[in-house]
Image (cartoon, rainbow, N blue to C red):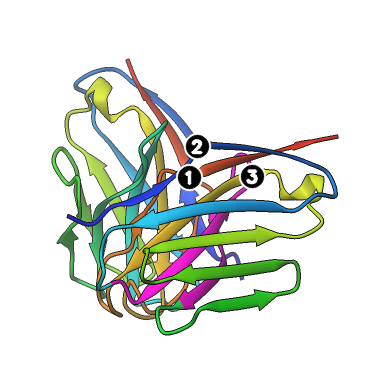
Amino acid sequence: NAGVTQTPKFRVLKTGQSMTLLCAQDMNHEYMYWYRQDPGMGLRLIHYSVGEGTTAKGEVPDGYNVSRLKKQNFLLGLESAAPSQTSVYFCASSYGGQGADEQFFGPGTRLTVL
Amino acid sequence: GEDVEQSLFLSVREGDSSVINCTYTDSSSTYLYWYKQEPGAGLQLLTYIFSNMDMKQDQRLTVLLNKKDKHLSLRIADTQTGDSAIYFCAESRNRDDKIIFGKGTRLHILP
């Protein structure tokens, strides 16, 4: 099992550009999450999904959109990147609800917006 | 609102015990977790404890929970260089609630 994989690992964008981060899991997990990690801020939940075809807002959803067309994939989109979105983005998945089961994390995507 | 606080840095000599402390504000917290993040990697669950427990031990790891004071600690016995990482305390109210993470404690091992 590959677990949770993220593509790409690194990306540099100019302000106003768009991009999509891809997360894939092969553990048949129902729940998937997107977090951002900033120095001194810990992890903050952007969006999450409780199953195929569903999405929900987390703590800091503004400026991001997500889609879960297939159970194994969770996409995070930035329509018009801003320097404030420079961060490390982590995808995670879990079998059950957020508080019930271990969340398995991907290796992260380091995004820089100039 | 819900909040999880932990100190940002801890330095410990190799072979000594490390104690990482965490406080949380939500008295309804049911699940309390410790996650470990090694350099360049995602978070990995180390251990967790339910709010009806006082202590949980797993090899070199001991988790202590003081529910009255809303204080959680992680003790790592015989600290090794491989324990160098950021440790995140986290909590959630129930099975379907979001997990609230602390800012993480960076553990530095001194030779």
Q: Residue at x 25, y 67 (%)?
A: A49
Specify the principal SS of the magenta part.
strand
Q: Quadrant of residue B63?
A: bottom right
Residue at coordinates 18% horizontally, 70% vertically from top-left?
A54
Q: Picture coordinates of residue B36 (x, y %)?
A: 58, 54
The answer to whether tags 2 and 3 share a subunit is yes
Q: Which structural element holds mark 3?
A: strand
First to last magenta residue range: B29-49
Measure the C-alpha gap from mark 2 to mark 3: 12 Å
| Crowd band around label 2 with a 10 angstrom C-alpha radius: few (<14), some (14–19), many (20+) | some
- The three-letter code of the residue at mark 2 reads Leu
Q: Which residue is mark 2?
A: B8
Crowding near the residue tagged with mark 1, few <14, some 14–19, many ≥20 C-alpha atoms within 10 Å? many
Q: Secondary structure at mark 1?
A: loop
Q: Which residue is mark 3?
A: B85
Quarter occupied by residue B74: bottom right
